[in-house]
């Protein structure tokens, strides 16, 4: 089955700096790669996603890049703010049997320091 | 629009007991998925239901089961609880009926502690 590895497990940056989280996946049939943000005491929330026919996607301060050949994708957050502090999860999915079955990375605890 | 609602939010059980968790999806969402979240393993897929049918299943033992009702509400059950079942159980609903590219909307989870 699919295996998603995520690095680093913790990341501390100064406010205003950029943060980069990297993930690799094993299943070449995976075609959907979302990123979720989980704040303390809450469920994960989708912040950006990318499909396999696109190499890069940007939404304000957040961007995701995908390298299908190398099977890795990354989340980039620019101009970090204290409210960006949370746990971030990458995930991958392939179209098997329809429906939704995400394989998640183990998460990155991002701390934005003042 | 109300979000995904999970009940109960917290519960404590002892080994050998069983537990039932409930999830009410966002109105209009017919796909409901369940995930187990633990500090060591992260989020792991349990199963997904669509129109009262299990559409996908993760690699969990048969002690973990679920079902979906005609109103899309879902329940999951864990029988013969083990200490390792202590986790946050997350339910997510999705609007997209087919393919695998629909946004999942997560509830806040049910935190299960097994003593």
Image (tube, coloured by chain):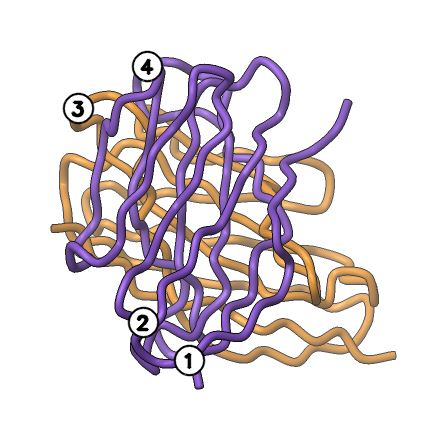
> Which chain contains the residue that carries disc 4?
B
Q: What is the display colour for chain B?
A: purple
| A30 with respect to B37 (left or right) | left
| Alpha carbon separation for disc pair 3 and 1 | 36 Å
Q: Kindly give the residue lying farthest to the bottom in the view shown.
A: B115
Q: Which mark is residue B98?
A: 4
> Residue A16 in the image: x percent, y percent?
81, 66
Q: Is label 3 or label 2 in front?
A: 2
| A70 with respect to A86 (left or right) | left
Mark 1 or mark 4: whose residue is earlier in sequence:
1
> Which chain contains the residue that carries disc 1?
B
Instruction: Find out whether the residues at labels 3 and 4 contact each other: C-beta distance under 8 Å.
Output: no
> Which chain contains the residue that carries disc 2?
B
Work out whether B37 lies above or below A36: below
| Alpha carbon separation for disc pair 1 and 4 | 39 Å
> Residue B28 in the image: x percent, y percent?
58, 13
Tag 2 residue = B81
Tag 3 residue = A97
Q: Are marks 4 and 2 on the same chain?
A: yes
| Alpha carbon separation for disc pair 3 and 2 | 30 Å
A1 vs B72, nearest the viewer: B72
Q: Which mark is residue B92?
A: none
| Alpha carbon separation for disc pair 1 and 2 | 7 Å
Q: Which mark is residue B14?
A: 1
| A58 with respect to B31 (left or right) | right
Q: Is label 4 or label 2 in front?
A: 2
The residue positioned 50% from the left and 28% from the top of the image is B73
Judging by colour alone, the chain drawn in orange in this rendered image is: A
> Residue A78 in the image: x percent, y percent?
70, 56
Label 4: which secondary element: loop
Instruction: Find out whether the residues at labels 1 and 2 contact each other: C-beta distance under 8 Å.
Output: yes
């Amino acid at each position: 089955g699919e295996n998603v590895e995520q690095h680093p497990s913790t990341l501390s940056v100064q406010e205003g700096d950029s943060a980069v989280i990297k993930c690799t996946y094993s299943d070449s049939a995976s075609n959907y790669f979302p990123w979720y943000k989980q704040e303390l005491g809450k469920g994960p929330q989708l912040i950006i996603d990318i499909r396999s026919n696109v190499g890069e996607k940007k939404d304000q301060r957040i961007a995701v890049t995908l390298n299908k050949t190398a099977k890795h994708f990354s989340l980039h957050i620019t101009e970090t703010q204290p409210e960006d502090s949370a746990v971030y999860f990458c995930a991958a999915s392939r179209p098997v049997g329809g429906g939704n079955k995400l394989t998640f990375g183990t998460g990155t605890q991002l701390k934005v320091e003042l | 629009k109300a979000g995904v609602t999970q009940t109960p939010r917290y519960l404590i059980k002892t080994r050998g007991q069983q537990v039932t968790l409930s999830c009410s999806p966002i109105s209009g969402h017919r796909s409901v998925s369940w995930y187990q979240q633990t500090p060591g393993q992260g989020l792991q897929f349990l199963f997904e239901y669509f129109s009262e049918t299990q559409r996908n299943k993760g690699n969990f033992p048969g002690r973990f089961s679920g079902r979906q009702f005609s109103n899309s509400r879902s329940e999951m059950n864990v029988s013969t609880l083990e200490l390792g079942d202590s986790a946050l159980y997350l339910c997510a609903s999705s609007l997209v009926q087919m393919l695998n590219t629909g946004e999942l909307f997560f509830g806040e989870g049910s935190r299960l502690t097994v003593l």
